[in-house]
Amino acid sequence: MASQTATATDVPVLERETTSVPLTPRELIWRRFRKHRMALLGMIGFVLLMVFIVIGSILVSEEKANVVDPVGRLSPPSEAHWMGTDSTGRDLFARIIHGGQISLLVGIMAVILSVTAGTVIGGVAAYYGGWVDAVLMRFTEAMLSIPSLFLLIVLGKFFGKDVQTIEMFGRTFSGSVAIVILVIGLTSWMVLARIVRANVLSLKEMDYISASKALGANNTQIFFRHLIPNTMGAIIVASTLGLAGAILSEAYVSFLGLGVQPPTASWGNMLTQAQQFIQRGSWWMWVFPSLFIVFTILCINLIGDGLRDAFDPRSSRHL
């Protein structure tokens, strides 16, 4: 009787195990990510920020953000101006919206540039090896030895104000925006290049790479169809964390007056205009831009931590 009972209870379990559908890698990653509550909170916060900026830019025009009203200068938050006005009477709520567009645009474009450069340089160095690897890695190490913030300040000082205004996405930007994007993107790819190199070095020794070569696949096909897609986990995590660094770098140089130039608003140059009024009681001029910078960086870092755990198969966050 005991043996019959055991057999009867074991059969449904075995049937459930054999008939269960295995999860795809994407489903496994999503399940691990959902276990990270702080990452989900960060994602919700970032989505709300994007909705605020996108919808706000539709409802509030850029012209309103640049309207000067000397009579209403340095007005505290009120029903007419929800976040007060700055030293020239411009509405801070409108400038926060359009300044967020610039800060996120700079961060996203700079990350795209840095990810492209880091992935190509690191992947090519690892795949071809030999003198190609030696030259590219020595160049990477040389770039790492140069302080990126110092280089950003120097180039912003000499070129930022000389570049003409540019048209992008239906808006007119000061030429300093392009300089900031280029400098941040071209000075932040080195760490990713080393990460990609380490991953490709291990992947290119796998059996499926040898099988692809035996089947006649050329180097370009192997590189872009097999090696890079299997490195996307590390690239996505590095890109997410790099976005936070790019936004913070833009805020640094704009705060120093060498980044995005007026009348184009960014959270960084809004803090620049507010620094001389900190001791005069105009707290709203620096509190609101600072809060948005901190909130954005916090949300992006939380998402990056969650993605890092989700892409790690040895993560302690079990399904």
Image: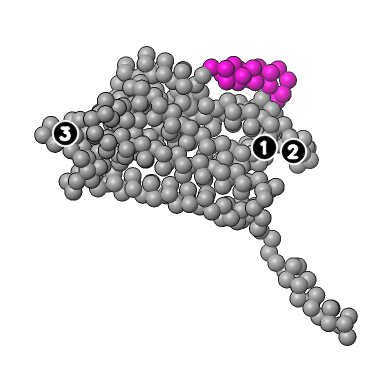
Give x and y (percent) for residue 222: 68, 36
Task: Please name the residue shown 40% across and 32% down the image.
Answer: 106
**Label 1 is placed on what type of residue?**
Leu
Q: In 3D space, how far apart are the residues under numbered discs 2 and 3 (Cα atoms)?
A: 66 Å
Quadrant where the N terminus is found in the figure: bottom right
Number of marks drawn:
3
The residue pinned by badge 1 equals 227
| Residue shown at 43% from the left, 47% from the top | 46
Q: CA distance from mark 1 to mark 3?
A: 57 Å
Give 38 or 287, whichever is nearer the viewer: 287
168 left or right, relative to 112: left
Circle 3 residue: 73
Q: Picture quarter containing residue 5?
A: bottom right
Badge 1 density bin: few <14, some 14–19, many ≥20, Cα 10 Å: many
- Asked if one can make out residue 95 in the rendered structure from this viewpoint, the answer is no
* Circle 1: element type: helix
